[in-house]
Image: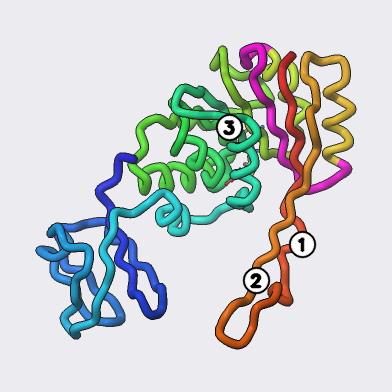
Amino acid sequence: MPTMKKILIEPNSGKKYLVKDLAEDYHTSFGIIKSKDLKGKKSKIRSSTGKEFLLLDASFPDLWEQFQRGPQIMLQKDIGLVIAKTGINKNSEVVDAGGGSGSLCLSLANICKKVTVYEIHPEHHKVVQKNIALTGMSNITLKQDDIYQGIKEKELDLITLDLPEPWQVNKHAEKALKDGGYLIIYLPNLTQMQKFLASAKGTSFKVLETVELLERKWAINEQIMRPEFEMLGHTGFMAFCRKM
Ligand SMILES: C[S@@+](CC[C@H](N)C(=O)[O-])C[C@H]1O[C@@H](n2cnc3c(N)ncnc32)[C@H](O)[C@@H]1O
């Protein structure tokens, strides 16, 4: 991934610091890290107070955690399923709408050849732009356009739709996807999903499955090993469709 960004990790707390500019000394709550150490080859370095840090190249998840948040993002559990079920890879060309906060489109750009993002709202467009800049990715194109009006890109491997009325995109998606390409719909409400599923009848899309994915985190330390008491009950429903 094209990033010169580093991540500093304080091993005891697990606290992470994103270092965007290696030319400057970096100030942490555990003292200052010298620029010459940030630029050096050692992965274990010390702050001015003698505190040891791990210095690593920032991975994509490290950057994802630092993204500016605008509208509700798609979470990693749901993104993981999109990637696994569509088999997208370094040769894939993708359209995503709406860009929102850039969580999904940037996760796709991290593994695909090319991603084009449609985001209609000017404020959300700015958030995605900022998050693209943070990653330094150059295989992603952001448009401030209404995807309900059409999709210019053709021969796509995947279209992902996380917006209120995906049924307005059916006819554009049919033209833009290659045969065998995937259309993924992500919606928070079953009423919307019902409307989409009804709209898909009579199109060239076969709905392969409709899924809700639950993730249960566990609390683990020396004394306890059990599911956490609180759980994120619902994110969204996903419909996996394929152009046949
Ligand atoms: C829930 S957010 C998407 C979040 C995004 N998937 C992420 O992971 O960060 C929905 C976005 O769709 C955008 N949107 C709604 N209608 C649209 C349209 N017709 N064309 C393009 N974007 C649209 C909204 O402005 C909003 O930013």
Q: Which residue is depicted at the point 22% across and 57% down?
A: 21
First along the sequence among labels 1 and 2: 2
Mark 1: secondary structure: loop
Say which mark, if any, is on residue 218.
Answer: 2
Residue 96 is labelled as: 3
- Disc 1 to disc 2, how far (Cα)? 15 Å
Label disc, if present, on residue 99 of the rendered structure: none
Indicate yes or no: mark 2 CB to ligand 1 under 8 Å: no
Q: In the rendering, at what x and y percent does residue 179 appear?
A: 66, 12
* Residue type at tag 2: Trp
Tell me, for residue 233, which label it has, or none.
Answer: 1
* Residue at left offset 62%, top offset 27%: 159
Q: Along the horizontal axis of the image, is 48 left or right of 61?
A: left
Compared with 149, 130 (above or below) is: below
Q: Is residue 222 magenta?
A: no
The one of 147 and 176 positioned closer to us in this rendering: 176
- The secondary structure type at the circle numbered 2 is strand
Residue 176 % position (x, y) = 62, 15
CB of mark 3 near ligand 1 (< 8 Å): yes
In front: 170, or 113?
Answer: 113
Check disc 1 and give the amino acid type.
Gly
Q: CA distance from mark 1 to mark 3?
A: 25 Å
Q: Residues within 10 Å of mark 3 (few under 14, many from 20)?
A: many
Q: Quadrant of ligand 1?
A: top right
- Extent of the magenta region: 175-191
**Disc 3/disc 2 C-alpha distance (Å):** 32 Å
**Mark 2: few/some/many CA within 10 Å (<14, 14-19, 20+):** some
| Labels 3 and 2: the sequence-earlier one | 3
Residue 53 location (% of width, % of height): 26, 72
For the point 28% across and 76% down, the residue is 28
Query: Quarter of the image holding residue 121?
Result: top right
Query: Which percent across, then down, holds residue 150?
Result: 64, 19
